[in-house]
Amino acid sequence: MADSKPPYKLIGQNYTTPDLVAKVTGKARYAEDFRADGMVFVKLLLSPRPHARVVSVDASAALAMPGVHGILRASDFPAPPPPPGAPPRPAGAPGAPAPPAGAAPAGAPPAGGVAAPVAGAPVAAQSGAQRATPATAAANTTAAPPAGPPLAAEIALTDEPLYEGEPILAVCADSEELAADAIEKIHIEFEPLPFVIDPLESLRPGGPNGRTEGNVFAAPNMKTLKWTAADMAMIDQGKFPSGAEAIDNLSIGDIEKGFKEADLIIERDHQQQTTPHMPLESRTAMAFWKNGKLYLHGSTQSVARTVAALAGWVGIKQDELVLISEYTGGGFGSKIPGAQTMAIPALMSKKLQGRPVMMRISREEETYIGRTRPGYTGWVKMGFKKDGRVTAIDAFLIEQSGPYRRQGDNATTANLASLCYQVPNMRFRGISVATNTPPPTSQRAPGGLQAGVLFEPMISEAARKLGVDEVAIRKLNGPSGQAVFGLLPPLPPGAPVPANRPRQKVTSAFINEALDKGAAMFNWEERKKRSGQRVGSKITGVAVATGAYTAGSIGVDGLCIVQPDGKLIIHQGIGNLGTHSLSDTARVIAEMVNMPWEQCEVVWGDTSKGLPWSSIQAGSQTTYAHTRANYATGMDLRKKIQEIAAKDMGGKPEDYDMANAKVFRKGAPGGRSMTFGKVAERAIQLGGVYDGHEVPKELNAMTKGAAASLVGMGLMGVARDNLPRDGQTYSFLAAFAEVEVDVETGVYTIVDYLGVADVGTVMHPHSLGGQIHGGGIQGIGHVRSQKLVYDPHYGAALAKRLHHNKPPTMLDIPLKMEWAAVELPDPSNPIGAKGIGEPSIGGGGAVIMCALAAAVGDGVLRRTPVHPEMIATALANGGKPTYEPLTSFI
Amino acid sequence: MPPIRDVMPAFELFQPATVADTLGILDRHGADAWIMAGGMDTFDWLKDRIARPKVVVDLSAVTELRGIKDAGGGIEIGAMTTLTEVANNGLVQERFPLLAQAALLVASPQIRNQGTAGGNVSQDARCWYYRAGWPCYRAGGNICYADTPTSVNREHAIFDADRCVAVNPSDTAPALIALDASMVVKTGGQDRVIPAEEFFVGPGVDITRLTMLMPGDLLTAIRIPATWAGKAHYFEKVRDRQVWDFPLVNIASAMNVSGSTIADSRMVVNGVAARPYRLTAVEAAIKGKARDKATADMAAEIAVRGAAPLRHNAYKIPLVKALVKRAIRGDAEWTS
């Protein structure tokens, strides 16, 4: 659809985003910055135990304190939804249970509306990025026998804490100091229950179960799975038992045949750490009730798509909620529909007849409740032909799944391998083990970052062993065009094997072009010669790696108004997560009607202002989804402007063109014209479809409601994205890096980094660069230092502060970082654009692992984060690792 | 009592302007008083509600405790001088570059702007069990949670553990011992000048403190003699992150090199024991030896004699060896 060099005026240009001045001047107001008359504060009592039942709570002394207003318990929450029965609900199905905290709103669409995700939308669009790929969802439907008793859903407060730090109750008082003093006066009695931190301990015969219902998540609920004594004996020798029993199974082709064809086989045990999301802004919220409506100032990634989740958590109808979230200090997937804990101040306020209640979440609390990326313990075997072609992959990945549900990152990791290496024979086996650690949810490329860190060093190792260039081996195996990918669940026993079981295909893949462009920019051919060379105590490592992730969904709405004052007001239901997609995609409407950006305004972040139904700000969907929706909306607006012009100035609508907020006969911009202001006045007189009295039936109920609130304000453009798409949309990154490793201390420096993205048409260069580098840095942090640490005996968190869990700092990243894009449009998007937030991270983490391996040798580094001593002691030990290979949370 | 963090409990706050007033307040309140310098250690204790002092004495207004001055070829550093000031001071950089380097590598720029010379040497152990409020030996209990078969103790001690395995986390403390500094401590009208090496105490002396400061004591200044000015200095810190991290191990070394011979030296590592660990056996062994690889290799072996690693910190032994070699090597080209 898109021309390779379309004559855009706004798209592809840098500009000052409408939120920028407020951000840099400190005028931007985040949830914590709001105040209201009579505002009081809540503090949380967090579980000091990893798993226990609350036997009794005596809060009488606390409640007797002057200035203490009340206490909130789990029983104050609306009854949790009925537990899911077998078979598991399709994500996004009406009547589905309220979404888990921090997860995407899998819940019902707005009352009366169409379910927003349409058939053919990626699973990621339907349930949020925690189900990021079709294979992940498929994995959910395997393991046919019903397992275990039904599981209660997570709610914001609990009487059976399943991890240390889980909120048990909230106390409200005049000040936080008073609330804290009151909490210390509460007498609370627990019955301790079994718990487990390291998944392998839970699989040990006689080992503890993380929940009373079982120890592993198996659709639809849980079951108990213990490995054999022989399996555990292998673990005790530091080897992963790759033949042990699994829960999830997915495959394609014939794995045995694939390995038989291989000239080189590489096998690796692997351990990746669980990391907290750690957005700069914690999940603070302030709430009050007025005239029967809940007003909530919260921190959320999505706005339109937070309403249903939050209303469900509080137990109100969606039209009883006004959500305000104009600015969000990061989420990385942990606030896709806000956070379930936002219901705490809302319900406390309700108890206090609507009095404003502020709940500020501290850094330690954020570490506990702010969600995690699940770590892995696992094993991978890969087969290669002499030329570097991947013939087979066998992967067994245990994920540290937290206590509430199967996260499924591990299946996504496997699915991405099937995409990135186009492997004909692959098997994935997985177990999501319940651990009494903070619950996971999507974290920027869930499964995608892990995939890069897991597989890419093995690709580099194979290239070295086979004497194939590391760029060439990736081009040889990588996807191109509408590449087919995905793993499939096993067929029911005895079922006939269909000839062509459906797999997925991508809408575009230009990773080879990204590799070529990157190799040229990085001067790959010259620089790779330096790899492995030592000067003094330092060895240089030079590497390339690739990454991929979902990059767009379809089927959402757009809404705009041309006002009588001539301004174009673009309404966006998108959250303002800081990625600029909020305004980047708004510019598509301006582009369609050739409107100067200075005469446009973007309305966002307040559901009382009339916001259209949107995608979730997750799964890197927004840029793709809302360029489509706003293209459709811009075309609707354009058509209506032409129609009004034809009505007033004669001729046919298609005779008219527009520029500079005027409509005129094609080819005669200096002739007779109507200003957009005049057009808006005429639209109001004409009514009907022109001023929003009539809107398309296919719109989502939220968009219809928004349109209804804006009726008669001017000329309305409103549409749903009904544009076709054939395939799933993925973006790709080719990353290049150079590291310098001091072999005496193991300390390493990243000297240089380049990310080249296949993201289709570039919407906003500055913002794209920020995402490519930001994702790269987050990947670097995963490889270098970020972690959660637990004492396994007490089930206690040890790394609760930023200086313990160690996100990367300014000096841990290269001084020099560059980026580029291949700028080849995706054919399924009218603008050609694709998302970038997540595709940027896996390559970033992977390329550092590959560069370290290039410097210190293959197989030395099999776990992350890579601490300096892992390098130094292995090198002193003849390249044999000395660290514990399989232990989690250390 | 349920734990609650990140909310400071109430206390009485004093902000004296003079040393005399400070000593008066400390004398009146005795063990109830908590001295706060830059607050970089104190605020954690207070916000976690684990330390519950009745009285906090904030020294930020005591201007006489700030500044760096010449003292007969050496220097005197006021206890409230910020770490940024120490790192940037011309006299420090010229005479004692290893101290300037140590101060520069503390934590982050923001913390160095707020944190003080006196605070950095007086800070408490950062063992994450102890700092989380667990009732361990150091907290007055009868167990070490960091020294069990399942403890996570990557950052703990390899030397001189005595029930407790916490380490001294300071970057400037080993530098000051290497430079043979002294601590000026006032109590009431009394002044004591304590050698830096004696200022720090291990669990065998007092398991609840890292220094010999007692209630009522005020560290007012750090004095560094001219002895090691202009000699061969070396400081290196190994850490996970290159900003805002405590040392896994650091090393401070001052050597008097005559020609190619090590005439004399002082060498101290930190992050390995409850007090900065002076390598006196190394100092004795390399005295009079050539400053070369053979000496360095020998020194490295001697340095780690008696080391007793825990489950997760055995790497500190080769790391100490590597740092000792590097300190002896300095800018020379040979590598290990």
Image (spheres, rainbow, N blue to C red):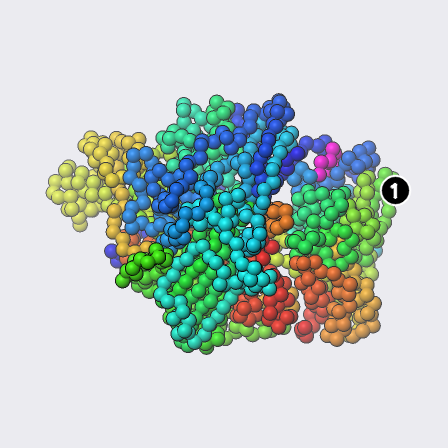
Q: Residue furthest front?
A: A494
Q: Horizontal and vertical percent for residue A739?
A: 54, 66
Query: Is residue A567 something that shows in the picture?
Result: no
Check the picture and name the quadrant holding the C terminus of chain B.
Answer: bottom right
Q: In the image, is residue A496 part of the stretch drawn in magenta?
A: no
Q: Chain of mark 1?
A: B
Q: Residue at x 45, y 62 (%)?
A: A395
User: Image check: B224 left or right of A666?
Assistant: right
Q: Residues within 10 Å of mark 1 (few under 14, many from 20)?
A: few
Query: Considering depth in this image, is A520 or A479 the residue closer to the camera?
Result: A479
Q: Quadrant of residue A60?
A: top right
Query: Considering depth in this image, is B156 or A621 the residue closer to the camera?
Result: B156
Q: Horizontal and vertical percent for residue A281?
A: 51, 42
Q: Quadrant of residue A510?
A: bottom left
User: Image check: A299 left or right of B312?
Assistant: left
Q: Which residues are magenta?
A: B51-59
Q: In the image, is residue B58 part of the stretch drawn in magenta?
A: yes
**Residue designated by label 1:** B190
Q: Horizontal and vertical percent for residue B268?
A: 76, 60
Q: Amino acid at mark 1?
A: Gln
Query: Is residue A858 something that shows in the picture?
Result: yes
Q: Residue at x 66, y 60 (%)?
A: B238
Query: Considering depth in this image, is A258 or A682 the residue closer to the camera?
Result: A258
State whether residue A275 is above or below residue B288.
Answer: above
Query: Considering depth in this image, is A265 or B284 the residue closer to the camera?
Result: A265
Q: Residue at x 32, y 58 (%)?
A: A494
Q: Horizontal and vertical percent for residue A629?
A: 29, 46
Q: Check disc 1 and report its element: helix, strand or loop.
A: strand
State whether residue A54 is above or below residue A738.
Answer: above
State whether residue A450 is above or below residue B8.
Answer: below
Check the picture and name the quadrant holding the N terminus of chain B.
Answer: top right
Q: Quadrant of residue A533?
A: bottom right
